């Protein structure tokens, strides 16, 4: 290996010792330039994609399809958070799980604000999605309720962690996660 560098495993399809990934200052600079170009291409692609008309019918099956059940932004932000939290695993299982959650929430915001712990436990008795249990779901919904009571919305909670001098949203995300 080069001085101070780390030699990773050989890449597939190449003989041992050839095409190894080397981490050194020189390689990181090249990687950075490649990453910047890739980022710029991705950014351009996403801008084009965002300007295309959106059709709800094309969303399914996707956790985002649930957001269109509500016109109210306050309901949508809670549905979006729940959708994001459970968007791991098989897409059919994700959709089934979110259907179960939202079947008990005609208005996610009103439900979260009005439901005491005992009601949550009753409504989600036996809930299990992969490694998330009923108890964890109920504690999560109670935490969302606390955020809504303190800040008024998830957006306001997130924005309270932002500072105009921040270069990115990392600090705001850390604040939101607490």
Image (cartoon, rainbow, N blue to C red):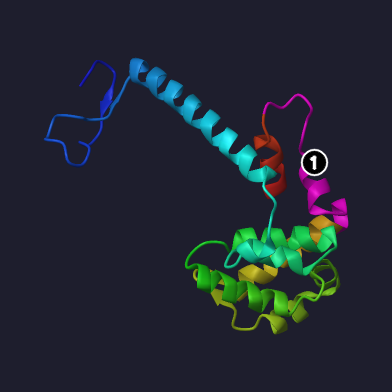
Q: In which quarter of the image is the N terminus?
A: top left
Q: Quadrant location of residue 69?
A: bottom right
Q: Where residue 173 appears, x then y in whole percent?
A: 67, 42
Q: Quadrant location of residue 17?
A: top left
Q: Which residue is drawn at 71% across and 39% down?
A: 172
* Crowd around label 1: few <14 · some 14–19 · many ≥20 (10 Å): some
Q: Residue at x 62, y 68 (%)?
A: 136
Residue 4 showing in the rendered view:
yes
Query: 153 or 29, which lies in front?
Result: 29
- 176 left or right, relative to 4: right
Residue placed under numbered mark 1 in the picture: 159
Q: Residue at x 83, y 47 (%)?
A: 156
Find the magenta span and give its range: 149-167
- 6 left or right, relative to 47: left
Q: Quadrant location of residue 7?
A: top left
The magenta stretch spans residue 110: no
Query: 171 or 93, which lies in front?
Result: 93
Above or below 147: residue 71: below
Q: Where residue 76 appears, x then y in whole percent?
A: 77, 61
């Amino acid at each position: 290996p080069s001085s101070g560098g780390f030699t990773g495993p050989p890449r597939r399809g190449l003989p041992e010792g050839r095409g190894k990934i080397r981490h050194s200052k020189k390689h990181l600079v090249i990687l950075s330039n490649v990453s910047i170009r890739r980022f710029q291409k991705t950014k351009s692609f996403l801008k084009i994609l965002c300007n295309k008309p959106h059709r709800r019918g094309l969303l399914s099956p996707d956790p985002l399809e649930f957001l269109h059940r509500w016109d109210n932004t306050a309901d949508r932000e809670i549905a979006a958070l729940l959708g994001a939290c459970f968007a791991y695993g098989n897409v059919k299982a994700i959709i089934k799980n979110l259907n179960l959650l939202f079947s008990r929430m005609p208005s996610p915001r009103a439900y979260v604000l009005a439901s005491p712990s005992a009601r949550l436990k009753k409504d989600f008795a036996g809930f299990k999605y992969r490694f998330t249990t009923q108890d964890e779901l109920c504690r999560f919904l109670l935490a969302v309720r606390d955020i809504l009571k303190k800040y008024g919305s998830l957006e306001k909670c997130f924005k309270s962690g932002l500072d105009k001098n921040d270069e990115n949203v990392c600090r705001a995300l850390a604040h939101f996660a607490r």
